[in-house]
């Protein structure tokens, strides 16, 4: 029985249906005195929620609920974080997703902190995992960005809309939102799972070792050579292949 895959956990509801759980945290990023990266609470809510949505959707599940553990005061920080969360849901037409909320009402805080969890439901037949085989090509969509880079050139990063486009393409195997482990880290993990080896392309246009922060890049596999740049409208790269050891 499947219990864990990448950053997602599974709980069986029936023989053919799973509860899917994902989470992400964000700390010292915001507009408070001791925050190390200065961005708005709105953006904190937006990007942290984006990570969770992408993790849930990428394995073929349907998002049904979110939680927001806001370690700051309800106003103004809490309400701005929630605004960003709801806007991110709206961008992918998930208008009616409930958010269970907790804020800090007893202590004055000097750093922004947020934890977001997502709950999804998926039928076994719709699971998008374990589709990659040795010999498949590996591609990346979006440029890895972290910290203040995220607010610059947003047309270069992957988001939930891009992910939903990819999910509709038959030639695509596994879809992996990339975070702090970077593109190369995710490719090595995938190759290891297949008892293979990640062979990187010799002329790479991006730093595949760099952290992709809050899922600014998506890795995907295909048995075919493809080019989706015109379909997704953001940078698209061939990064390598999985080969036998």
Image (cartoon, grey):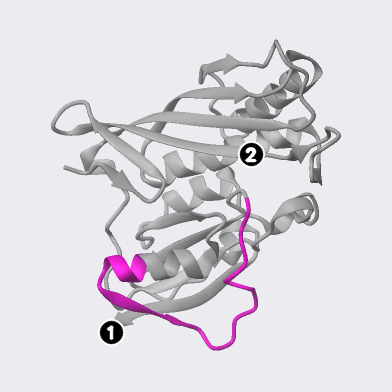
Q: Residue furthest right?
A: 33
Outermost residue, top side: 106
Q: Quadrant of the C terminus?
A: bottom left
Q: Residue furthest left?
A: 15
Q: From the top left corner, tell me how far across and down residue 175 is, in percent.
A: 42, 56
Instruction: Please state the horizontal and vertical placement of residue 67, each as a whole percent of the image.
Output: 52, 23
Task: Quickly name the residue at label 2.
Answer: 26
Q: What label sits on residue 172 in the rendered view?
A: none
Q: Where does label 1 land, which residue?
A: 245
Q: Position of residue 136 (x, y in %)?
A: 34, 74
Residue in the picture at 33% in, 39% down = 9
Residue at left offset 72%, top offset 20%:
78
Q: Give the image location of residue 8, x and y in percent.
A: 38, 42
Badge 1: residue crowd in 10 Å (few <14, some 14–19, many ≥20): few
**Which is nearer the eye, 37 or 13?**
37
Q: Is residue 204 magenta?
A: yes
Query: Which of the pair 25/109 is nearer the observer?
Result: 109
Prevailing secondary structure of the magenta residues = loop
Identify the image quadrant of residue 193.
Answer: bottom left
- Extreme residue toward the bottom, this view: 202
- Asked which secondary structure carries label 2, the reply is strand
For the record, the magenta segment spans: 190-213
Q: Is residue 52 above or below residue 104?
A: below
How would you rate the neighbour count of disc 2 (Cα within 10 Å): few for under 14, some for 14-19, many for 20 or more?
some
Image quarter (top left, top right, bottom left or bottom right) of the N terminus: top left
Q: CA distance from mark 2 to mark 1?
A: 37 Å
Mark positioned earlier in the residue sequence (2 or 1): 2
Q: Nearer the viewer, residue 53 or 30?
A: 30
């Amino acid at each position: 029985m499947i219990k864990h895959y990448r950053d997602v956990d599974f709980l069986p509801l029936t023989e053919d249906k799973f509860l899917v759980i994902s989470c992400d945290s964000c700390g010292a990023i915001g507009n408070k005195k001791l925050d190390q990266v200065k961005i708005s609470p709105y953006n904190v809510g937006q990007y942290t929620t984006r990570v969770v949505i992408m993790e849930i959707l990428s394995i073929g599940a349907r998002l049904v609920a979110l939680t927001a553990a806001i370690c700051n005061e309800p106003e103004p920080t809490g309400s701005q974080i929630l605004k960003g969360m709801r806007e991110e849901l709206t961008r992918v037409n998930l208008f009616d997703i409930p958010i269970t909320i907790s804020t800090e009402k007893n202590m004055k805080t000097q750093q922004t902190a947020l934890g977001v969890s997502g709950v999804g439901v998926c039928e076994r037949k719709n699971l998008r995992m374990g589709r990659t085989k040795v010999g498949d090509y590996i591609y990346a969509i979006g440029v890895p960005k972290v910290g203040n880079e995220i607010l610059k050139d947003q047309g270069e990063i992957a988001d939930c809309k891009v992910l939903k486009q990819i999910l509709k393409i038959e030639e695509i195997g596994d879809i992996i939102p990339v975070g702090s482990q970077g593109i190369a880290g995710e490719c090595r993990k995938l190759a290891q799972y297949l008892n293979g080896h990640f062979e990187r392309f010799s002329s790479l246009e991006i730093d595949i070792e760099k952290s992709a922060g809050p899922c600014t890049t998506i890795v995907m596999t295909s048995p075919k050579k493809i080019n989706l740049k015109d379909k997704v409208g953001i940078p698209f790269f061939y990064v390598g292949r999985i080969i036998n050891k």
